[in-house]
Image (spheres, rainbow, N blue to C red):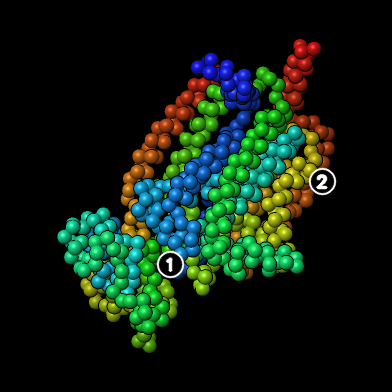
Amino acid sequence: MSKLMSWVDARFPLSKFIKEDLTDYPTPRNLSYWWNFGFLAGFVLVLQIISGIFLAMHYKADASLAFDSVEHIMREVNYGWLIRYVHSTGASAFFAVIFIHMARTLYYGSYRAPRELMWWTGQGLLLLLMATAFMGYLLPWGQMSYWGAQVITNLFRATPFIGDEVVVWLRGGFSIGDATLTRFFALHYLFPFLIVAVVLIHLVALHSVKSSNPSGINLAEKDNIPFHPYFTAKDFYGLGVFLIIFCYFVFFMPQFFIEADNNIPANPLKTPTHIVPEWYFLPFYAILRSIPDLLGGVIAMGLSVMIFAAMPFLDRSSIPGGARYRPFYRVLFYVFVIDVIVLGYVGAKPPTGVLVVVGQVSTFIYFGLFALLPFLSIKEDKWLRKRGLPAEVDVLIKSESEEIEKKAKKNT
Amino acid sequence: MRYILTSLLFSGLLCFPLANAWASSDAPLADIDFDRSSESIKRGAYAAKNTCMICHNLKYIKYLNLLEIDFTQSEVDTFRGKAAFDSPIKSSTSPEVAQKLFGMVPPDLSLMAKARRGGARYIYTLLTSYQVNNEGVVENHLFPGIKMPDPLTYAYRTDEARQKELKQTIQDVAVFLEWAADPRAGERRHLGMYVIGYLIVLTFLFYLLKRKIWSRLD
């Protein structure tokens, strides 16, 4: 065995990789359970790819067969119901895990230097995930699949000058049809592998800058512990808790995340009374509807997803540790979370009466918070420095910098 | 603070699907405890065959599937008549005739309990919502303007004993259609108990392992 390893190692840095990036990879010992969600996202990605490949073995991407083939999977394929419910629940789980992963990054300011590229590759992953989920939702060929795709592809009509042509080009016809279904299936199968590639880039960046941690400063060597066995044990415990919740939905409430209307085969002649996207798109959908103009709405929706990328520029504070040591930023964070929940609620309801106003105000607050951040973070920075940092942070920064200096002296 | 954040996030995430579910729950559904025993489902199969299946298809259920709800082979044979053992349950009215009679082809019933919010409760409420109005016309409050004529003549059954009997039949049909929409549900819940039980034990062991490993750091 060791002979084989040294043969491989002479040609490929296998042992080095295992040692430096898996077993001995230095990880801050003060990571909380909020740092489990990156691992969970990776787990759900693998789960979706595996269940998806098995579904593809029985699914028929043909407008006249798609709906029946899903029912065939549900009723006649051995454990087909399990594979399908794992996949449909997995889509929701993926977004839930990713939203928490993003919320952690925002709360602790993990997007700040030197982790901007982690944040931006993450932004790319979010877009790929949304595209994959959107295309996958068409495949069961139910009423909501069909009309959701109809509404969303229709948004591209807002493209200046060539809007109508773009929509036809995307759909492969004047409305959603067989051509749309087959291309969405092909892309829905392709995109997860693009996601895997971007995840690898995300991880290479991670292993270069290392994990952020709740204190917000880079810890000295003494406060870093090897990934294995400490974080493998912690991640597996987190995985167990996640799987209990996940399996509860799969086995006992599998229809919870599936719209009732999607159990009716797609009917191009009959529009459902109320078209709603999946829950994970609702806040963005609410922003789209809050702007009375189509082009304006599409721009606002695109911006609401992409604006996260600007966070490293918008946050001008030099105080470490994100919201933990920054009272104003913390308020901003919680207002943002509540605002997104309100937008999600508005997105699920028909746009009538007071809800229109609530949606518009929430949209204004959504963008307002990002606009406020540069000024607020500078003001907060000055105020905190005048008042003095919390004793806890001061002590930590001092001891960590002494430790790093000592190490540097030793080396020279 | 951390706990507030946690509960906010999780409750917030749960809000979205719930908001979706509430979005179009306009009419209140009957609040009843369903009898989901195999006798009830079986009675429902006969009642559905004699009423619903005159006009509606049940295309995702084949006669042989009835063996799963405790039909014996000879009962299935009587039930199917001349139809093949492995053929789907089809209505006795052709689509062309149905189109002429009702102005539309009646929808397939195999997924009806999943395709309406409330499932079996929706079906039960719909069938018990037929009433004779002041002008002597039969109406349905849950679905005004429904094209389906009162299939069990519920609206005209005013004496209590007969109405009670009809309600029992309607509940049987509702639980039968619930089974038809998701015939693997029983198997799913059964397996789910073992899976969740196993995961709880496993997670507890992972927790102990994590504690033990991290105690080396103290």
Give residue A337's mark: none
- In the image, residue A276 sits, relative to residue A334, either above or below, namely below
Q: Which quadrant does the N terminus of chain B fall into? A: top right
Q: Secondary structure at mark 2?
A: helix
Q: Residue at x 47, y 35 (%)?
A: A240
Chain letter for mark 2, please. A
Between B184 and A139, the one lying in front of the other is A139
Examine the rendering and report whether any part of residue A365 can be seen: no
Chain letter for mark 1, please. B
Q: What type is the residue that disc 1 sits on? A: Pro
Q: Secondary structure at mark 1?
A: loop
Q: Residue at x 48, y 37 (%)?
A: A241
Q: What type is the residue that disc 2 sits on? A: Phe
Q: Position of residue B139 (x, y in %)?
A: 38, 80
Examine the rendering and report whether any part of residue A241 can be seen: yes
Between A313 and A200, the one lying in front of the other is A200
Q: Which quadrant does the C terminus of chain B fall into? A: top right
Q: Residue at x 70, y 54 (%)?
A: A304
- In the image, residue A213 sits, relative to residue B131, either above or below, namely above
Give residue A375's mark: 2
Q: Within 10 Å of the Cα at label 1, are there few (<14), some (14-19), or many (20+) other Cα atoms? A: few
Q: Quadrant of residue B98?
A: bottom left
Q: Within 10 Å of the Cα at label 2, are there few (<14), some (14-19), or many (20+) other Cα atoms? A: some
Residue B48 left/right relative to A363: left
Residue A283 left/right relative to A3: right
- Residue at mark 2 shares a chain with residue at mark 1: no
Q: Position of residue B112 (x, y in %)?
A: 39, 65
Between A202 and B8, the one lying in front of the other is A202
Q: Position of residue A65 (x, y in %)?
A: 44, 61
- In the image, residue B44 sits, relative to residue A22, either above or below, namely below
- The residue to which callout 1 is attached is B28
Q: Position of residue A113 (x, y in %)?
A: 76, 35
